[in-house]
Image (cartoon, coloured by chain):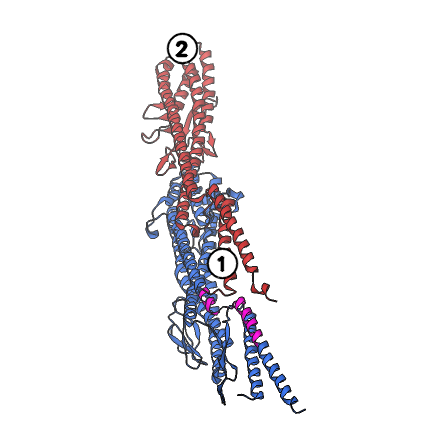
Chain colours: A blue, B red
Amino acid sequence: MLNFFASLGLGVRSMQAQRAGIETAGQNLANVNNPAYARQRVILQTSEAVQTAVGWQGTGVDATAIVQLRDALVDRQIQAESSVEGFLEAQQQALQYAQSSLGEEIDRRADGAAGSAAAGGASGQAGLAVSLSDFFNSFQSLATSPSSTTERQTVLTRAATLVSRFNQVDGRLQALQDNLEQGVQQDVGDVNRFLDSIAQLNDRIVQSEFSGATANDLRDTRQEQVEQLSRLVNVEVTSQPNGSVNLSVGGELLVSGRDVLDSIETYDAGAGRMMIRTTAGATPLNLTSGSLQGQIAVRDGAVAQLREEINTVAAQLIEKTNAVHRAGFGLQGTTGADLFEGTNAADIRLNAALADNPGLIQASGVAGAAGDNQVALALAQIAAQKIPELGNQTFSDRYNQIVAEVGLSLSSTNGRITDQQLVQNMLLRQRDSVSGVSLDEEMTDLVKYQKAFEASARVITTIDEMLDTVLGLKR
Amino acid sequence: MRIASRTFPNLVSQQLGKIAARQSRLQEQVATGQKLRNPEDNPAAVHRVMNLNVEKDLLGQYRQNIGTLQETANATFNVIKTLKQIFDRASEVAIQADDLKSPEELRTFGIEVTQLLKQAVQVMNGQSRGAYLFAGTRSDQAPFVATTDVDGHVTGVDYRGNTDVAEAEIAEGSLFSVQVPGANNTGAGARGLTGDSRVGADLFGHLIALQNHLNSADYQAIATQDRPALAADEENILFHVGTNGALQSRLEAADKLAASRMDGTENLISKEADADLAESMVRLSETQVAYQAALQSASTILRQSLLDYLR
């Protein structure tokens, strides 16, 4: 049988254990809305029994540990899927901007100049498609009135609009590529900051867990940072026995325990394309997902291809139009002038000499015949020509296909993101089912521990009364 | 599955987000009447709409071309009509100029023919949209220039235009011209209005001869030379009247065809791009009901907590 003081100790230990339970429930309740937090539980263990005259007798309960409830498998899956989501979202954002850059919106209610979206024509569309169509159609009008200054001025206005649209589209796509470049630089900085931060957390976790206790809150923070890092790059995480994790990015070990072995940087892989490699080792990284790779892939893929295709359309337009125009004659018999100058969408411009004098448009095929329209007609008919350099398509067909291809890429990415979000939400629900805090559970625990605490206090009160009784025997 | 406290709000938030997105999409369809707006909405349909818009714009352009050609054809017809009236009066004069008329009467007729000649030159130098109608493709200069002697008699009318005509497109690959050269003595190409060597027409030459014969009171030459020559001119003018009518009919037919094709194209665009308003409205109402139901059920459930039952 325990003595009175040992019994009092039992009550005290029990109260301490229940208080630990209440504090843990309080900690869980406080973090109910913290997405990085994994709920914690107090592990209670029966205190060591002592041998008494009546046999082994229990000495109460001890709170031996506070553990967090996590499913490592789900955590790894979420981390991997975060990487895919980061990749897709970077692509989606860039493609949305690329789509906007083209300005090809269908607005069936817009009516000519009154509807801003269809200012170029009555087709309810804006952008290069309408400008191309208007440009070639203006030559049709000129062909019906070859000596008309009004029709000539219309040709110049439509040509200037077309040139301006090409310049604008290319400028926007250039800006998009620049933004993606800046995004890559920013992500590289973020990755390096996360590598440093995770290495520091490793250090603190190793130190904190040296005594054997688990540094739950530090592990939560580290897991959150690993997931944030995963959104940027595909990272491989290897847990170490001392509680730290090693991080490899693109097959290169960058963090080993508390040490950052290497960081990452951008380098010029040729033609001004910035790629990623390790800083010290200068090893190019094989990135497969994450927003960093998403931005690189869309920059060098869809956006670069889009710019190249628009440039090809512009270059062919300059070449084909000039070849026909050069052979014609203006109202004053001038010949040999180009309609457009430049070589691509960025530098295409209207011949300045013509811009100020519509009479210099070389619409006639015969010198001294102002009413001849052979060249104007030939220029108008370029619209229907299938150009080998454009894949045997007309200018409009090719451009419309380019627009559709951007739409298709974006639509496909949107679909993949929807699927990805379903997977991600499902995994997050799975994680919440293990690690998420339930108010009902915690409130129940709170009542449970509170009652146990009260009961333990009652044990102490009872022992105290018993001690008083024993002490009263002397009087 | 165990439900954590944040699982439910997260789920509600996701579900409301989905319904709100659908609601927004349907509301936009109802407001704009369109189911397509951006290429991402339906790339294949947007591609088709863009191609159809190009086709529709081109058809619109063909109709504009036809309108301009009709305008030119009308102006040409008005000139031909006036020319025919001038010709008819000259023919009457040629018939009336017989041996019953005195030389003074014939000279009076001669003065009238001189005026008819000058009027014909003036008419044949008519313009449409700033271009001379009967100058061929040298439309920037007056095609006919009359020369007169000291007495004001017309001694010659030079044609300074050419025999080329400009064609415009009225349908894919279909070129069309309503232009008539003032004269064509090359033996090839479009038939000239006042003169054509292939049919012996030379209106100005024949009227000058008539004027001269009237002035010299040579009624025999009028009877034997001028009247038969004028017959060839009449035939030529009538040929142009008929041709102009046929051209205008073709233009009208081409315009109707282009208008009908535009309607067809518009229907195709509408099928691809326009929303079925009734269907969109019904779906929007359904979605609104779903949204309200989700909000109500979520607010009821989210309010419930064990806290309400603990003191």
Labelled disc at residue A201: none
Determine the main secondary structure of the stretch shown in magenta. Answer: helix
Looking at the picture, tell me which residue is in the foreground, A387 or A147. Answer: A387
Front-most of residues A293 and A166: A293
Q: Residue B98 — which label? A: 2
Left or right, B136 with reference to A175: left
> What chain does badge 2 belong to?
B
Q: Given the image, on which type of amino acid does mark 1 rest?
A: Gln
What residue do we see at 42% from left, 21% from top? B84
Identify the residue position indicated by label 1 in the image: B14
- Amino acid marked by disc 2: Asp
**Span colored in magenta:** A429-452
> x and y percent of residue A304 in the render?
40, 60
Tell me, yes or no, whether the highlighted magenta stretch contains residue B168: no
Q: Mark 1 to mark 2: distance in Å?
A: 105 Å
Where is residue A99 drawn, in percent x and y? Answer: 45, 54
Q: Which chain carries label 1?
A: B
A268 or B15, nearer to the observer: B15
Q: What residue do we see at 46% from left, 11% from top?
A: B105
Q: Is residue A442 magenta?
A: yes
Quarter of the image that includes the C terminus of chain A:
bottom right
